[in-house]
Image: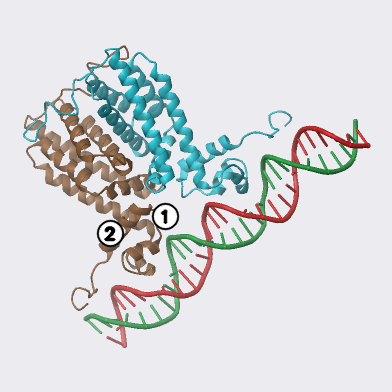
Chain colours: A brown, B cyan, C red, D green
Amino acid sequence: MSLAATHRSLDRRPQILDAAEQCFARAGFHRTTMQDVAGEAGMVPGNLYRYFPSKDAIIVALIERDRAEIAADFAALEGSRDLMAGFKTLGRKHFVEQPREKSILTLEIWSEAARNPTIAALMGAVQAEVRRGIVAVCRNAQRAGEIPADADLDAIARLILTLSDGLIRRRALDRDFESDREVENLLCLVGAVLCGTISLPPCASAVSSTGI
Amino acid sequence: MSLAATHRSLDRRPQILDAAEQCFARAGFHRTTMQDVAGEAGMVPGNLYRYFPSKDAIIVALIERDRAEIAADFAALEGSRDLMAGFKTLGRKHFVEQPREKSILTLEIWSEAARNPTIAALMGAVQAEVRRGIVAVCRNAQRAGEIPADADLDAIARLILTLSDGLIRRRALDRDFESDREVENLLCLVGAVLCGTISLPPCASAVSSTGI
DNA sequence: ATTTAGTGAATGAACGTTCATTCGTCAAAC
DNA sequence: GTTTGACGAATGAACGTTCATTCACTAAAT
């Protein structure tokens, strides 16, 4: 009580965000009351409004916090030498190590983004960040000769995004989802696409509607 | 007024489901009131309860209706000769032809499934249906020699599921999403995996953490 | 004394659900 | 052909609850 518990000038925002994250993942945004969040944060409802102007502002802050983290992750990768090792690190961090609750929260954010323009915009920003990161990192690899110079980086970024979103949804809801194995498999696939085993945009070989 | 408008014995459930689908896609499940649904269905709130015992029951019925449709889609495919053509038909139907609102509604269902056990169970059923369908259709193709006999059908089904979920999320929220092109590309990729250009589970070639 | 942090009861709007009532149609009775 | 009674469908005004937000107040720190 004397030293650590002296709450003066201790910014409560991270604490509130942690509490909200917990609650939103557990019960969803709309089923979580401000009383719930306050309780989880060890304070009383009214006090939340000293730190956030509204319930909505809390999710917005939550997403913004995520965006910053992702941006940092990619920044750390940008100088990296080994492309696939970088993807592996990122993939493992976000889909294996991070608790499943994060995926559930992401579902919540998606559903919210479909109505709330502020959240939609923020999500767009996050996604742009990711896309930019992927392209940048791939361009590095291109210059180093790791992957073909004519690879369609944008198409690759889109592919990775689609796969990531699929993983998030499955991890959040499939009872028997083995993130470990799934991430491994998909990285494999991305690797194959990256080194040109499969060409994406022109759909060169294989597959036509008359037999494979 | 004389013939068609005589509303006797006209089952209002489909009409209510259509209205609810519209509303839920527009405003989300929790932001849609029973008054909204009633209004959209051209009736009054109280009357909804003659056809559904609760608001929850309406989403449940909505999902069940979807499950039936998907089951039918796969059933129609099961006898088909050309594997990829079948996938293409399904892919186009669900990700290109169907209105974007369906994807948004799916986001809503996902977020709801994370708390409501009934909905989670139903979603599990839908997914099991899809997975079974994919495996069945692929097994046919295997017997016909369209794809290698040793292909890991379960892994392929999981891949397709992940891709589908990713597509749904992107179609629902990405402003500049071109479903047409994206579906085409991904079908390409699935085709390549199917005919063994890339092997998934053992991660045979390519990609290790020491360079591609 | 003044500022800052925290309290928790109160408020008022929103919403899912209920229910007493009305409406429209049909069929039997006349 | 008209009347009557019955019944399912539809109404819409309430009810009771839940919940985001407010605010008058206290406690502590400076």
Q: Is residue A196 visible?
A: yes
On residue A18, which mark appears? 2
**Does dot 2 land on a helix, a strand or a loop?**
helix
Amino acid type assigned to the residue bearing label 1 in the image = Arg
Vertical position of residue A77 compared to residue B83: above or below: below
Q: Between marks 1 and 2, how big is the CA–CA gap?
A: 17 Å
- In the image, which disc is placed on residue A31? 1
Q: Nearer the viewer, residue A8 or B51?
A: B51
> What residue is drawn where x is 22% and y is 77%?
A1
Q: Secondary structure at mark 1?
A: loop
Point out the image quarter for the C terminus of chain B. top left
Write the residue at 29% across / 54% down. A62
Q: Is A131 left or right of B122, judged from the image as shown? A: left
Q: Position of residue A150 (x, y in %)?
A: 15, 25
Indicate the chain on which mark 2 is placed: A
Q: Are marks 1 and 2 in contact (CB under 8 Å)?
A: no
| The label number, if any, that marks residue A10 in the structure image | none
Q: Quadrant of residue C1?
A: bottom left
Taking the spot 35% from the left edge, 21% from the top edge, the residue there is B88
Q: Tell me if mark 2 has few (under 14), some (14-19) or many (20+) residues whose alpha carbon lies within 10 angstroms of its own.
A: some
